[in-house]
Image: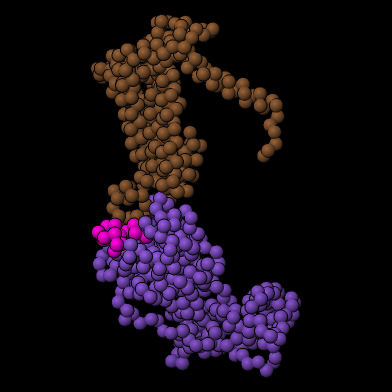
Amino acid sequence: MASPSPKKQTNVPSMVKLSGIRKSFTDVEVVKGVDLDIGKGEFFSLLGPSGCGKTTLLRMIAGFESANEGIISINGEQMNKVDANERPTNMVFQSYAIFPHLNVAQNVAYGLKKLGLSKDEMKKKVDEMLKLVDLDGYQERQSYALSGGQRQRVALARALIMEPKVLLLDEPLSALDKKLREHMQQELRRLQRTLGITFILVTHDQEEALIMSDRIAVMFDGKIAQVGTPREIYERPVSQRVASFIGVMNFLKGDLNGKTEKGISITSDMFGEIMLDANQMPSPLEPGAVTIGIRPEMMSVLYRDSDAADNRLTVKVTSVDYYGDMTFYAVSIPKSENHLSVCMRNTVGRHVYQLDDDIVIGWSNASMVVLR
Amino acid sequence: MTKRAPLSLLIFVIVYLLFLYAPVVLLPLFAFNDSAIIAFPLDGFTMKWFWALGEEESLFRALKNSLIIAVSASLLSTCFGLLTARALARHQFLGKQAIFGLIMAPLFLPEIIIGVSILIVLMQLGLNLSIWTVIAGHVLIVTPFSVSILTTSFSNMDRSLEEASLDLGETNFGTFRRVILPLVAPGLISSLLIGFTISLDEFVIAFFLTGTDPTLPVYIWSMLRFPSKLPTVMALGFVLLVMSLILLSLFEYFRRRSEKLTGGYGKTQHHIAQEGE
């Protein structure tokens, strides 16, 4: 396993900077002190379960909510006192908010009216934009006659035609079916690369965040738990909570003995004392009880005794979930309460085990991550 | 659905329609009847009651009063309704439910109580009765209708439409003009027409609050004291009937037109407004 690239060097100029942002609604604090620095041209995702404050944060950047505390600046200018209609941001709403009394071209041209363009210039811009989002020829179509995916494209065109510094996307794909969603993920990524505009995406879908983003901020309870590239977030989560939110992770109990120049030393009754690379502990921890995390796909079933593995364990299969391309095994460790999940890719001739089979699983030291 | 309705249901419907519309059919019958007495058998065809109508100068004054009052009351109540409905739909504030209840209360209070109460207040304030006092009374009873019609219009509107407009650089006023107004237009038209209709044929409050300028219903009532004027009242009734049919057709025309303009949205809007009525 290649170790993920070290933390992205921030030589990209900053576009959106949040410092010490707090926000309460009546008595409930929903954003509890958020600091973020989002780079120019970055595809940035705010990822978290519903109610974590990610949408509120996005709405504060857009100017629909005002922060109780903290400073929001966009492109170096402080935005706290600037109204939504004066900010260099545009938003794609979760409901798309297509104006129902206007047709596609009128919707897309809505914001241009203020710029005082001539009819021809306006038409040219609208046509170009509709071409960009693959809706050319739909100019005269009434908005109620659009499908979900088309509505989303109109919303996108309507926002992008304003040439915003930052495009804000509030769960834009959640209303689409799986196929269309996957297609739009690619489309959005392509658009963002072509235009070079900073995109900030709010989503609760970890897969979506991983696929689309340059960097992700994982939020829980109004706070940011971790910021990093998709690989950092997935492979080097700082806490069990982040690890479990981004997919599945097995957790083993262990002890951190200390840090030497060779790396970090940990002990577990399962495999004794081993040395791990320093980057396998993403957030600095004190010596003592720690958790060791391993992703299910980093563990493998050892079909032959000769299969190499740093660590091996004989376990009993307690459930088998066959997904076609993958098989997920839940296994129990003898004389232990611990359950692990192991994921194997199904290939030609590879045996799929049954319930109660005794199997040997193995994993490498490099696949482990030490966390809280 | 081609199954035939049972006979009992058919009879019920016929009786129901007769009961509802037979009196209305009598209106033109006696309006064109050449006799001063409202009774069968009919005497013959005449237009003289209509010509008599033309000579009633006080009638035209009453009609003019009624039109001024109905137009003013429906405009005012629709403005109030628009503001109230928006506040109720968009903002949370202390005593919201209580305020809503108070606004809707005139809907459930007997009109005679409202009429007498306003009269007492006006007397205490030493104000003279005029067209304006009737308008005030009518605004009071029509506003609940406007509020309930427009509240449905607003609550059906996606909040993010307004935000989208602001987000695209439009001002608050521009948003109101370019997004909110077109979307609540069907509600506004319904509210105006309902206000106009209610005010036009409202009698009790107008009776109490009218000064020297009677409204049309008050004028008709005063004419009923003279049996010789009865056929003229019938003729007047017929004219009013035709006028309201024209008004209804106009309303339907505008409704369909706005439906076309707002697309599918207007349709659902109106259905909801109708349910509200």
- Residue located at (42% from left, 76% from top): A214
In terms of depth relative to the viewer, which is nearer, A365 or A103? A103
Residue at left offset 58%, top offset 76%: A250
Q: Residue A113 magenta-drawn? A: yes
Q: Quadrant of residue B217?
A: top left
Q: Residue at horizontal 54%, vertical 77%?
A: A291
Tally of numbered discs: 0
Q: Position of residue A80 (x, y in %)?
A: 28, 60
Position of residue A110 measured from the top left corner of the image (x, y, whole percent): 34, 57
The location of residue B188, given as percent across then percent down, is: 38, 38
Say if residue A332 shows up in the picture.
no
Is B252 magenta? The answer is no
Magenta stretch, main secondary structure, is: helix
Q: What range is drawn magenta here?
A: A108-122
The chain that appears purple in the image is: A
Residue A64 placement: quadrant: bottom left
Q: Is residue B245 left or right of residue B8?
A: left
- In the rendered image, the residue lying farthest to the bottom is A306
Q: Chain B appears what colour?
A: brown
Query: Can the viewer see residue A357?
Result: yes
Residue name at image x 44 percent, y 22 percent:
B241
Q: In the depicted view, which residue is nearer to us: B212 or B65?
A: B65
Residue B276 point in image, percent of width and height: 48, 36
